[in-house]
C-alpha cells in the first residue's frame, strides 16, 4: 500500500534494477560515497504543498532520529551535522556516506528499500504524528481519503501525480482502490472467484491450485526476494556447536519441507541468496548443507547432540512449517516440541533470545546486502537482527567489503564467498525462497508484477 501512496528518490524496474522516481537523474562521485540527485520540479504532495530537497533531508533525519526499521540502512551516511545530507538548492540534494556504498540506491527506493520514502514535513507538523500514521500524505499516485483502522483503506487517484505513461497520458488510470483485509483464506479465494474483489495481494498457499483453476482469474507468480531458514539460538546447547548445526541441517529434506509446509510454492535452497537477484545467483552452491541423513547422524553424534531435546517457537502464521520441521527432526532422533505463542510474544521472545529454535528469515530484499547485513554482522556492530547470536569475524568483514565494491563483478565474487562461508558455518539451516504469489481478475490490465511490490499506477479494469 505504501508504494502507491509515497514515492522515493528512486524505484525498481521489473528486473530489480533502478529507475528514477522523485529524482529525474543522479550522479555518483567521490569513489561511490557521494550521491547527487537532481529532483523533479513541480511535484506536489497530496495536501497541495510543494516537494523540495528540504523534504528529502527531513525524511532522512526522521528515519534516523526515530530509529525507524530502515534506519540501519543509512548507518554509513555521515551525520546531518557533518554534511550527510546537503541541500544545494530546492531541487538538488546531495547524500554523503563515510565510505563507498554499493547498495545505496536500492535503499533509497520507495519500496522495499524505504530508507528515503519521502514524507511531507508540512503535513506531519500540521496533523501531528499520530494522525499522520493513520492518514499519511505522500507524492504517490494515490492519496489516502479514508482509513477505518482494522477494516479498510480507501485510496483515490491523486490528480496532480507527476508521472505519465509513454504516450504522455496522466497516471494513474484508476479512479481509486478500496483495500480491505480478508483473514479467512477460503473467503478470500471465493471473493476473487466471484468478482467481489479484483486483486488478491497474497494468495493463501493452500488455495493456490484453486486460484490457478478458477475461471476469469489469473495467478501471478514471481521468484521470491527472500530466504527462510531454521534459526538455532547459539546461546543454548547444542546449537553453539557448528558441527551440531551442520548435522541438523543435513537431517532436513528441504524439498519435502517445501511440499509439506508451503504446498510446493517455494524454491528449496541451501543458501540465502535468492534467484530473483539473478546477477549473483548460482545453481551450483556448495553442498555442505545438502540433505544427507547418514552424514547428519554422524556429525550429531560427534557433537554429542544425539537425542537432544528442544522447542520450536512459532506463532499461528508459521505453525504448519513448525509441524513439518518437528516431524523431520523427530525422525532424525531429536525430541522436538512446538511452542506456539501470539505474534507479539513471538517477536518479543525472538528478539531477546528467549527461544531454542524457530523458522525465520528475510523478506522483500532485491539486493543481497538487505537480506544479509542485519542478520550476520556482529550483534553489537550492525547485526540488529542477528538473533541467533552468530559472531563470526570473516562474515562480518566480507559484509563490509561487499558494500564498498562498486564494480558489480567484484561485488558478486565477494557475495558468493560470503554465501559459501555462511553455508559452511550454518548460522541458519537454509531452507528455501518462498514464491511471491498474487492473483487478479482477468479484467485487471496493465499490472507489472515486481516481486514484493504491488504498484497500481499503470493498472486499469476492463468492462
Image (spheres, rainbow, N blue to C red):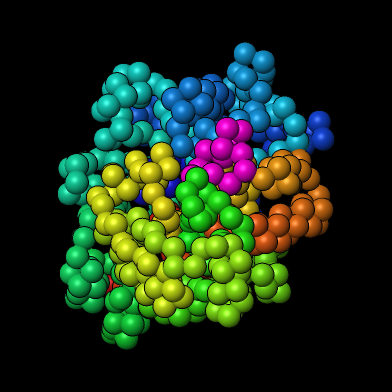
In magenta stretch: residue 380? yes
- Per the picture, the main secondary structure of the magenta-coloured stretch is loop
Q: Which residues are magenta?
A: 378-391
Residue 178 placed where, x, y %? 24, 54
User: Which residue is nearer to you in this view: 231 or 107?
Assistant: 231
User: Which residue is nearer to you in this view: 202 or 304?
Assistant: 304
Residue 267 placed where, x, y %? 52, 73
Q: Is residue 205 above or below residue 150?
A: below
Residue 378 placed where, x, y %? 61, 39
Residue at the image position 48 percent from the left and 22 percent from the top: 65
In magenta stretch: residue 221? no
Residue at the image position 43 percent from the left and 47 percent from the top: 3
Residue at the image position 22 percent from the left and 56 percent from the top: 181
Q: Seen in the image, is 27 located left or right of residue 17?
A: right
Number of disc labels? 0
Q: Is residue 167 visible?
A: no
Residue 72 placed where, x, y %? 55, 35
Residue at the image position 39 percent from the left and 21 percent from the top: 122
Q: Quadrant of the image for the C terminus?
A: bottom left
Q: Is residue 337 visible?
A: yes
Q: Seen in the image, is 244 located left or right of residue 180?
A: right
Q: Which quadrant of the figure has residue 214?
A: bottom left
Amino acid at each position: 500500500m505504501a508504494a502507491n501512496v509515497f514515492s522515493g528518490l528512486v524505484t525498481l524496474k521489473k528486473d530489480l534494477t533502478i529507475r528514477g522516481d522523485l529524482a529525474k537523474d543522479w550522479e555518483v562521485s567521490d569513489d561511490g560515497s557521494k550521491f547527487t540527485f537532481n529532483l523533479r520540479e513541480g511535484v506536489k504532495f497530496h495536501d497541495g504543498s510543494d516537494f523540495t530537497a528540504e523534504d528529502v533531508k527531513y525524511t532522512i533525519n526522521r528515519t534516523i532520529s526515530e530509529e525507524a526499521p530502515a534506519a540501519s540502512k543509512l548507518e554509513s551516511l555521515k551525520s546531518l551535522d557533518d554534511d550527510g545530507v546537503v541541500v544545494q538548492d530546492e531541487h538538488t540534494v546531495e547524500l554523503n556516506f563515510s565510505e563507498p556504498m554499493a547498495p545505496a540506491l536500492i535503499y533509497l527506493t520507495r519500496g522495499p528499500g524505504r530508507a528515503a520514502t519521502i514524507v511531507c514535513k508540512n503535513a506531519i507538523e500540521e496533523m501531528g504524528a499520530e494522525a499522520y500514521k493513520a492518514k499519511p500524505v505522500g507524492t504517490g499516485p494515490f492519496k489516502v481519503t479514508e482509513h477505518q483502522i482494522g477494516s479498510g483503506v480507501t485510496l483515490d487517484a491523486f490528480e496532480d501525480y507527476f508521472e505519465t505513461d509513454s504516450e504522455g497520458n496522466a497516471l494513474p488510470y484508476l479512479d481509486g482502490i478500496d483495500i480491505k483485509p480478508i483473514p479467512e483464506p477460503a473467503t478470500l479465494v471465493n471473493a476473487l472467484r466471484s468478482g467481489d474483489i479484483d486483486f488478491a495481494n497474497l494468495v493463501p498457499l493452500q488455495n493456490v491450485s484453486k486460484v490457478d483453476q478458477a475461471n476469469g482469474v489469473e495467478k501471478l507468480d514471481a521468484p521470491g526476494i527472500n530466504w527462510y531458514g531454521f534459526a538455532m539460538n547459539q546461546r543454548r546447547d547444542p546449537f553453539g556447536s557448528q558441527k551440531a548445526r551442520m548435522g541438523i541441517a543435513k537431517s532436513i529434506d528441504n524439498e519435502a519441507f517445501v511440499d509439506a509446509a508451503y504446498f510446493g510454492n517455494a524454491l528449496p535452497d541451501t543458501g540465502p541468496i535468492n534467484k530473483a537477484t539473478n546477477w549473483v545467483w548460482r545453481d551450483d552452491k556448495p553442498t555442505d548443507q545438502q540433505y544427507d541423513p547418514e552424514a547428519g547422524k554422524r556429525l550429531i553424534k560427534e557433537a554429542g547432540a544425539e537425542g537432544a531435546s528442544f522447542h520450536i517457537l512459532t506463532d499461528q502464521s508459521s505453525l504448519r512449517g513448525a509441524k513439518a520441521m518437528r516431524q523431520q527432526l523427530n525422525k532424525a532422533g531429536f525430541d522436538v516440541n512446538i511452542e506456539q505463542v501470539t505474534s507479539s510474544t513471538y517477536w518479543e521472545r525472538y528478539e531477546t533470545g528467549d527461544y531454542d529454535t524457530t523458522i525465520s528469515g528475510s523478506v522483500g530484499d532485491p539486493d543481497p546486502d538487505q537480506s544479509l547485513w542485519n542478520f550476520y554482522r556482529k550483534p553489537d556492530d550492525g547485526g540488529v537482527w542477528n538473533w541467533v547470536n552468530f559472531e563470526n569475524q570473516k562474515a562480518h568483514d566480507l559484509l563490509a567489503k561487499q558494500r564498498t565494491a562498486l564494480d558489480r563483478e567484484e561485488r558478486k565474487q565477494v557475495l558468493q564467498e560470503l554465501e559459501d562461508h555462511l553455508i559452511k558455518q550454518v548460522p541458519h539451516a537454509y531452507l528455501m525462497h518462498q514464491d511471491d504469489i498474487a492473483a487478479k481478475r482477468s479484467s485487471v490490465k496493465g499490472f507489472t508484477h515486481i516481486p514484493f511490490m504491488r504498484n497500481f499506477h499503470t493498472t486499469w479494469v476492463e468492462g
